[in-house]
Image (cartoon, rainbow, N blue to C red):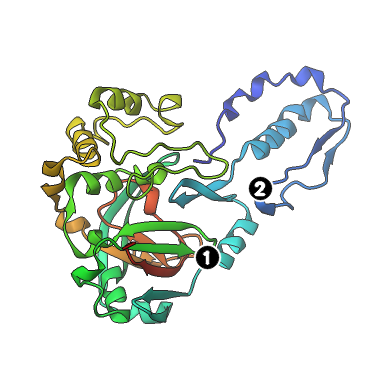
Amino acid sequence: MGGAEGTGGADNLGYDMINNLDVDVALNHRRGHARDLAKGVRMKRIEESSHRTLICVAVALALVLPAQRVGAQGAGMAMPASAPAAASADEAKATRDVTIKSGGQSRTFTLAELQGFPKVSLARYSVIGAKMGLIGPYTWVGASLIEVLTRVDPTIANPSHKGSEILVTSSDNWKVRLLWEELFAAVPRGAALYNIKGCNECHGIRGEGTAPAGKKAAPALAGRTLALDAVLTQMRAGGDAHGGINPYPESQLARGELQAILDYYSGSKAAAADTFVPPSERRSVLLAYEKEGQPATGKDGLIQLIVGPDEAASRYSHWVKTIEVVPAAR
């Protein structure tokens, strides 16, 4: 995600064609961020000795892509990482309280109140973004989402909540979901791996498929029997073969793991009975407010959702504002 790809080709821009030409450089970054970065800059009658330096600067600025928002559904709100305006925009989105809704109860916790919960840490936590690649490793500290939910609704762990979803919404309306079972019960191995590996980012939290506006539709997986080798070939190839997603090497998704996912969504009873237990050091789900021993910044989100078992960044969500337990349809 983001990055100035191709900037090494400046020598092929044809500098001999620009003698005595007027060059307008006006960069208009998406979402209005950093409009002052190059607005109105005009270079006239460039001397031969300064052509290369000035044009390289213009090209470098034009190719700086905004650092993208990481979360469900891949890249979202775009932020130019180097512009001062970006920092202020991040701070504007940063949340200093979070509202929890469950079982007809609602309560808002300030950042200070979250810091008053027992501190939970996730050491050397890293995830892989669909476009950005590796994020981390970082050590995060925060309040356990289970503890926060239970403070609002003491019944939240009861089996009556089975099938519910936990909807996390950020201040920019970014939404991610967790299954109630991921926090309070056993999850079938195939369903757990599906979310851990980031399949939910495109195919939905339950393999239902999605068709977001402006993006490629992702087919439903639930209720389908798919050939392992065919799907594995697509995922290993990546790119156009897999909806524009980066390739999944064996180290990121083993053949046996994909088989477990496909078995579960095909409706296999044996797969449904095979439960998953995440490593003890990755079990926690946090509302994190501290990163690498320092208070999280507006860029980090101040209140950041960290889903410990996840290996993909599909639920690595900044600026958490509301968390709602959505009951299962009956």
Seen in the picture, residue 229 relative to 151 is either above or below; the reply is above
Give the residue type that dot 1 points to.
Ser
Q: Which of 303 and 148 is in front in this view?
A: 148
For disc 1, the neighbor class at 10 Å (few under 14, some 14 to 19, many from 20) is: some
The residue that disc 2 covers is 30
- Amino acid type of the residue that numbered disc 2 sits on in the rendered structure: Arg
Say whether residue 147 is left or right of residue 129.
left
Q: Nearer the viewer, mark 2 or mark 1?
A: 1
* Residue placed most toward the observer, 122 or 207: 207
Image coordinates for residue 73, horizontal then vertical, percent: 45, 47
In the rendered structure, find residue 292 and report the number of the disc placed on it: none
Q: Is mark 2 on a helix, strand or loop?
A: helix
Q: Where is residue 185 in the image (x, y as percent from the top left)?
A: 18, 62
Label 2 CA crowd tier, 10 Å (few <14, some 14–19, many 20+)? some
Q: Give the Cα distance between marks 2 and 1.
A: 19 Å
Which residue in the structure is indicated by mark 1? 171
**Quarter of the figure that contains the C terminus:** bottom left
Q: Residue at x 59, y 67 (%)?
A: 92
Query: Label 1's element?
Result: loop
